[in-house]
Amino acid sequence: MLRLDIQLFAVPFRRTSKTKKRMRRTHLKKEVGALVLCPKCGAAIQPHRACTKCGYYKGKNVLNKEEATETKESK
Ligand SMILES: [Zn+2]
């Protein structure tokens, strides 16, 4: 019995042009998520998440950052 050691796979009929390639890649981009301003320090943060700058969420220090305690003392 004749056994051929070959692999069969799909082969592009023709080369993708620069324009077609670039048109396809216009959709491949990273999207910037929604940002809100922290009510405590005013930094741009993601909504419904604790602030990475001061560690506050819903008026409480949930990350126990030292910067937050410093601002508390100065206030
Ligand atoms: Zn903040």
Image (cartoon, rainbow, N blue to C red):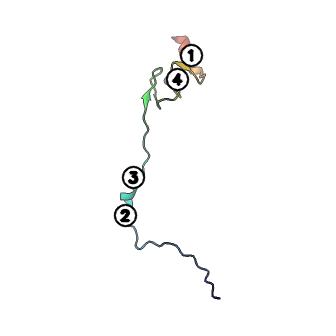
Q: Amino acid at mark 4?
A: Tyr
Q: Amino acid at mark 3?
A: His
Residue drawn at (51%, 29%) of the image: 49
Residue drawn at (38%, 58%) of the image: 24
Left or right side of 55 for 36: left
Q: Are marks 1 and 3 in contact (CB under 8 Å)?
A: no
Give the labeled residue for mark 2.
18
Labelled disc at residue 62:
none
* Badge 4 element: strand
**Residue 66 x %, y %:** 60, 20
In terms of sequence position, does the residue under pointer 1 or pointer 3 come before the other?
3
Residue in front for this viewpoint, 36 or 4? 4
**Residue 16 x %, y %:** 39, 67
In terms of sequence position, does the residue under pointer 2 or pointer 1 come before the other?
2
Q: Quadrant of the N terminus?
A: bottom right
Give the labeled residue for mark 4.
57
